[in-house]
Image: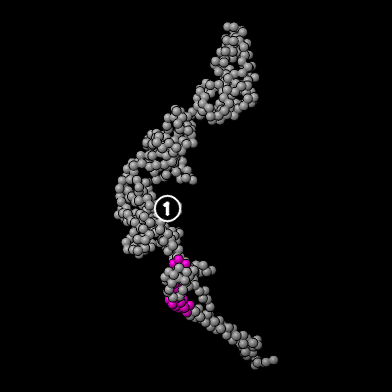
Amino acid sequence: MSTSEPGQEPTAHEHEEKPPRGVRVMALVRWGLVALSAAAAAWAWSSYVIGHRAHGDRVAALAASTQRYQCPMHPQMTSDEPGECPICHMQMRLMAAAPSSAVPDVAAMPGMAPDHATSSPSGPLSQSSVVPGGTPPGTTPITLSFDRVQSIGVRTSIAEERAAGGTVRVTAVVAAPEQGISEVHVRTAGFVDRIGVRETGVRVGAGQELFGLYSPEVFQAESELLAAKSFGEQGTRSVEAARQKLSLMGVPAGAIESVFSSGQAMRVIPVSAASGGYVAKKNVVLGSYVTPEMTLYEIVDLSRIYVVAEVFPSDAASIQVGTEGRFTLASEPAKTAVAKVDLVYPQIDADARTTRVRLQLPNDTLKLRPGQYGQVDFALPVRKGVVVPRDAVVDTGLSTYVFVDEGGGRFSPRVVTVGREAGEGIELLAGLSAGDRVVSSGAFLIDSESRLQASLGQTSADQGAVVEPWHRP
């Protein structure tokens, strides 16, 4: 215990406590860990930068030093040196370089995203492959030697600007007219007691009896008419009411007069055809019980028939109501009939992608029957357009294109929009200009060569790519 002089305050160090044991050592350890972490981070960054540069140098050196040769006909045959293919003995070609495949796909790696996306100009989604004037998918421009062009028989023609029009020929079918169809019904239920027309396909006249009907309701109404007649003049109103009732039940006026004059009710009344024509359907047999909702006969008047033609969209705009068409039966090409379009149907067939137009023709002698096929030649207005030979156009179903001769044996495929036919040629609405030279003979062989070289180029790019794993420390 310390003491102090009287009147003096105790000093500060007399109350100060000593720090715990080990504090100085922990402080040194903490600062050591911070220094080690900083050193590790610096080493990791420097090794990443050095490794990335080394990897790029290796890829560039490998791509520059690697040259592969490939057989055009047998892509599986490759070599490091030029020479002949051991299978077909053709000279092997230098494989196309694929610099875009020599580096890894950054977009495909997790956590990595490129600054912008690019696409191959010859890919299936390229804009140039779908618009007129572009390159169709699966093809590529080719260059052929003069001997090669002569051997495959390539001929060229110049696209001309001339009048296209005249006529367009489309397929057509004969159809029954809608307004010429009539159905036969009864107005009261009953039983078929006799049949006058027993089969389909026969011709009937207007008012001809089809069958006889026994109806209890009709028989009762006839009895009421005769009862009203027996009252004499006092029953005049009743007679007229009974006559009207029988008429509303479908009893012919002649049958009503026969009952009234004979004084005896008719057990069976005739049911007649409302219009003349051919029996298309028959749904009644002897003894049938028939009701008003049943269609007993269907009669078609074929004195006038429809000719329905299928028109392609490129010609639909030129064919309107009043356009003259010449119909020719496929079975009798020597016989033709001329009529005008009286209806253009508003809907388009989604499967055939055609528009239907209708003509009406007289058919009193029944030379035309529903279901017959033929063709219609429409006279179209003349207009100027770019016309090329038909054989110059290649239509794959997915794209339509021609091969343009650019000179020096180079042929380039070009997408076009096809219009109407013009004699031995065909009109092109877009994709080609007047004066361009196109392949008019041998386009199929040129197309095959173009597709072969396009596929070989893609195969070379796939097989000749230098791909190494992405370097990470």
The N terminus - image quarter: bottom right
Asked if residue 410 lies left or right of residue 40, the reply is left
Question: Residue 239, position in %: x, y?
Answer: 58, 12
> Which one is nearer the viewer's eye here, 454 or 146?
146
**Mark 1 secondary-structure assignment:** strand
Residue density around tag 1, few if under 14, some if 14–19, many if 20 or more, within 10 Å: few
| Quarter occupied by residue 310 | top left
Is residue 300 visible in this depiction of the protein?
yes
| 293 vs 4: above or below | above
Magenta stretch holds residue 109: no
For label 1, the residue is 395
> Which one is nearer the viewer's eye here, 30 or 175?
175
| 343 vs 447: above or below | above
Q: In the image, what residue occupies the spot 36% across and 55% down? A: 441
Q: In the image, what residue occupies the spot 53% across and 78% down? A: 473
| 435 vs 83: above or below | above
Q: Disc 1 marks which amino acid?
A: Asp
Which residue extends farthest right?
Answer: 1
Question: Residue 126, position in %: x, y?
Answer: 43, 59
Count of all numbered marks drawn on residues in the image: 1
State which region is magenta.
52-75
> Which one is nearer the viewer's eye here, 52 or 308?
308
Question: Residue 223, position in %: x, y?
Answer: 63, 14
